[in-house]
């Protein structure tokens, strides 16, 4: 993941964030408000790095983020040579706390296996 200080122009430093999290974040975590490349709507983004995983959640107020939005966020928050993924877990492991949020994940201690390029 990139240093999140590089995204400070989008960092949410509102009293709500301070109240909820106790801080506005650092180079590895934080809340951000990123304008959508699709329609300009603000996409709330939460990023963190902990327990061997880098994680970015992206939400929209009234719909699921589009592929274009997720790709844009991936390129903002992760380095060009890093692979991030969305996971579709077993139903028993699925927890939904927001209907319009998607997540990007990247393990920090192991590469993500990839299919042959011609399959992608």
Image (spheres, rainbow, N blue to C red):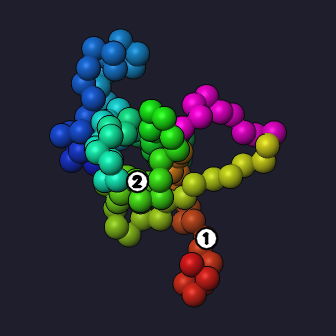
Badge 2 is on which residue?
69
Q: Residue at x 24, y 39 (%)?
A: 10
Residue 22 against residue 113 in the figure, above or below? above
Q: Residue at x 81, y 39 (%)?
A: 92
Q: Could you tell me residue 22's position as x and y percent?
A: 35, 16
- In reply to whether residue 52 is colored magenta, the answer given is no
Give SS at disc 2.
Answer: helix
Side (left or right) of 100 relative to 36: right
Q: Which residues are magenta?
A: 92-101
Would you place residue 25 above or below residue 55 in this image?
A: above
Q: Give whichever of discs 1 and 2 has the lower sequence position.
A: 2
Q: Quadrant of the C terminus?
A: bottom right
Write the residue at 47% across / 53% down.
66
Which element is circle 1 on? Answer: loop
The location of residue 54, given as percent across then percent down, is: 47, 47
Q: Is residue 51 above or below residue 106?
A: above
Q: Nearer the viewer, residue 41 or 10?
A: 41
Instruction: Estimate the x, y position of residue 73 in percent, counting from the top left.
Output: 37, 52
Name, please, the residue furthest toward the bottom. 118
Drawn side of residue 81 relative to residue 87, left or right: left
| Residue 28 shown left or right of residue 60 in the figure | left
Quarter of the image for residue 32 reads top left
Q: Residues within 10 Å of mark 2 (few under 14, many from 20)?
A: many
Q: Which residue is mark 1?
A: 113
Q: Are marks 1 and 2 in contact (CB under 8 Å)?
A: no
Identify whether 81 is placed above or below 86.
below
- The 10 Å Cα crowd at callout 1, few under 14, some 14 to 19, many 20 or more, is few
Q: Residue furthest left?
A: 9
Q: Is residue 96 magenta?
A: yes
Q: Position of residue 74 (x, y in %)?
A: 40, 56
Specify whether residue 29 is in view. Answer: no
Compute the Cα span from label 1 to label 2: 24 Å
């Amino acid at each position: 993941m990139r240093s999140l200080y590089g995204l400070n122009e989008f960092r949410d430093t509102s009293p709500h964030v301070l109240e909820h999290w106790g801080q506005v974040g650092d180079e590895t975590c934080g809340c951000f408000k990123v304008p959508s490349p699709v329609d300009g709507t603000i996409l709330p983004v939460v990023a963190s790095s902990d327990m061997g995983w880098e994680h970015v959640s992206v939400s929209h107020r009234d719909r699921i983020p589009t592929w274009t939005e997720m790709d844009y966020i991936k390129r903002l928050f992760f380095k060009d040579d890093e692979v991030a993924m969305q996971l579709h877990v077993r139903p028993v492991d699925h927890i939904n706390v927001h209907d319009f949020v998607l997540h990007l994940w990247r393990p920090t201690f192991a590469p993500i296996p990839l299919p042959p390029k011609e399959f992608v």
